[in-house]
């Protein structure tokens, strides 16, 4: 599970949190139900909180958390950063709180927002990022939410302007780097309809750093920032 930590002008930003400390202590029901198929790392040192601390930052330095979507393995750590403001697409927030309408909704765990974080929800208003409808967030450095609905009803990619260009984190909308492990029918069923476009985009933009929510560490070392 890949999270990104960004040093911004007014503190640190996280893109996704991974599972939280409470999830290591008491795995959510869905993890216990699908224990054979779902693997949550067992070592709490892998949590975003412990990794941020290992870098020498207190949790309170994380001022903003941007979510690709709210599945337990992407937002479980929200409560580990209770002071952070949360940025998420309106549709994802509604899907998380609404009645389960599809099987991937089973991966939402309500307790992950029980601490009532300060949340900002966004919707598209006609802007684009590299041809994708997108929403610019009020943050520095420049960050865009790029709707890639399908994996969940409000799933988004996150594009961040870096010193070297752009980092585009596509979350769970594509298996880039894992192609040989994921058959096409499963891609469409689980990841949504954007895989072919994102694959073309990656080929057209070799200058860009493109990451996904679940990738091998070796691939991250090869293609990461
Ligand atoms: Zn997911």
Image (cartoon, rainbow, N blue to C red):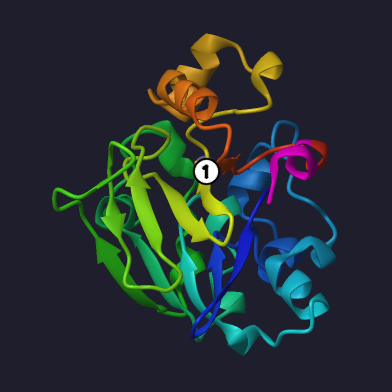
User: Closer to the camera, 210 or 110?
Assistant: 210
The vertical placement of 22 against 67, above or below, is below
Give the residue drawn at x 36%, y 32%: 150
Task: Using a 10 Å C-alpha cutoff, classify the residue at mark 1 as few (fewer than 14 neighbours), some (14 to 19) or many (20 or more).
Answer: many
Residue ID for mark 1: 171
Q: Position of residue 136 (x, y in %)?
A: 30, 60
Q: Position of residue 43 (x, y in %)?
A: 85, 60
Left or right: 43 as drawn, with respect to 38? right
Say which of 150 and 23 sits in front.
150
Which secondary structure is most common in the magenta stretch?
A: helix
Q: How many marks?
A: 1
Residue 197, horizontal then vertical, whole percent: 41, 23
| 214 left or right, relative to 129 | right
Q: Residue furthest left?
A: 126
Q: Nearer the viewer, residue 145 or 26?
A: 145
Image position of 64 with respect to 172: above or below: below
- Residue at the image point whose x is 79% and y is 84% from the top: 56
User: What secondary structure is marked by label 1?
Assistant: loop
Tell me residue 96's x, y (percent): 36, 54
Apparent side of residue 41 relative to residue 144 in the rendered image (left or right) = right
Q: Which residues are magenta?
A: 219-225
Name the residue rendered at 14%, 53% in the picture.
125
On screen, residue 214 above or below 47? above
Asked if the magenta segment contains residue 157, the reply would be no
Is ligand 1 closer than 8 angstroms to the Cβ of mark 1? yes
Kindly tell me whether residue 90 is visible in this rendering. Answer: yes
**Residue 5's image quarter?**
bottom right
What residue sits 50% from the left and 86% below the top?
83
Is residue 69 at all visible to an observer of this figure?
A: no
């Amino acid at each position: 599970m890949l999270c990104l930590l960004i040093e911004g002008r007014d503190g640190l930003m996280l893109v996704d949190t991974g599972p939280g400390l409470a999830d290591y202590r008491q795995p959510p029901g869905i993890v216990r139900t699908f224990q054979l198929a779902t693997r949550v790392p067992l070592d709490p040192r892998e949590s975003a909180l412990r990794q941020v601390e290992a870098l020498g930052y207190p949790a309170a330095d994380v001022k903003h958390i941007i979510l690709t979507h709210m599945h337990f393995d992407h937002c479980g750590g929200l409560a580990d950063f209770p002071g952070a403001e949360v940025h998420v697409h309106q549709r994802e927030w509604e899907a998380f709180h609404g009645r389960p309408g599809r099987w991937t909704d089973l991966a939402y765990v309500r307790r992950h927002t029980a601490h009532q974080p300060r949340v900002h929800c966004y919707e598209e208003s006609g802007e684009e990022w590299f041809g994708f409808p997108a929403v610019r967030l009020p943050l520095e450095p420049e960050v865009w939410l790029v709707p890639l609905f399908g994996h969940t009803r409000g799933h988004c990619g996150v594009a961040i302007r870096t010193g070297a260009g752009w980092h585009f984190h596509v979350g769970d909308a594509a298996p880039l780097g894992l192609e040989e492990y994921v058959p096409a029918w499963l891609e469409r069923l689980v990841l949504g309809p954007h895989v072919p476009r994102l694959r073309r985009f990656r080929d057209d933009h070799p200058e860009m750093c493109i990451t996904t929510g679940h990738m091998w560490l070796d691939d991250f070392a090869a293609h990461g920032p």
